[in-house]
Amino acid sequence: MGAGVPCEGLDDLVTGRWRKLVWNIPFNGLSVVLDATTAEMVTDPACRDLVRSLMVEVVDAAAGTGHPLDAGVIDAMFDSTERMVPYAPSMKLDYLARRPLEIEAIYAEPVRTAAAGGVPMARTEALWRQLAFLDQRNCATD
């Protein structure tokens, strides 16, 4: 008996996680750091370049750890984001509600995993450190 929710199985959960991070790393983190919606990020040329550079870094990390992604994954992520209604990603909503951010799973663990595979994620690590600072300050304030 199903819940009536369409879903698709994955051949490799780790590769699927890296694919999801291609979107989550730039859009979740930058929505907080830049106080921007998805539409603002994809329509501003400088921000779009920053998003793309983070996506490339994630794709490179995935490949470097033995989980290569489809060649068109970045363009597909941009295409789907451009079709979305502009919104604040879940991390931005958590930040606004003063809930702890999912920094460990979305940033710290991928950076450590990539580093262990010899692939640096300097841009992602910089975003992680900014988010950790903002999160600590945001959650410590009443």
Image (cartoon, rainbow, N blue to C red):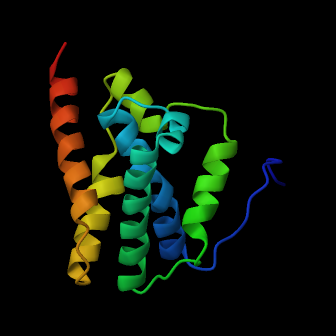
Residue placed at 38% from the left, 76% from the top? 60
Does the image show residue 25? Answer: no
> Going by the image, does 64 lie left or right of 8?
left
Q: Nearer the viewer, residue 60 or 42?
A: 42
Q: Nearer the viewer, residue 93 or 29?
A: 29
User: Which corner quadrant of the image does residue 71 belong to?
Assistant: bottom right
Q: Nearer the viewer, residue 142 or 18?
A: 18
x and y, in percent, of residue 21 in the image: 45, 60
Does the image show residue 101? Answer: yes
| Quadrant the N terminus occupies | bottom right
Extreme residue in the top direction:
142
Rendered view: 73 above or below 92? below
Rendered view: 82 above or below 108? above
x and y, in percent, of residue 141 in the image: 16, 17
x and y, in percent, of residue 92 in the image: 41, 32
> Going by the image, does 63 lie left or right of 33?
right
Residue placed at 36% from the left, 68% from the top? 57
Rendered view: 64 above or below 127? below
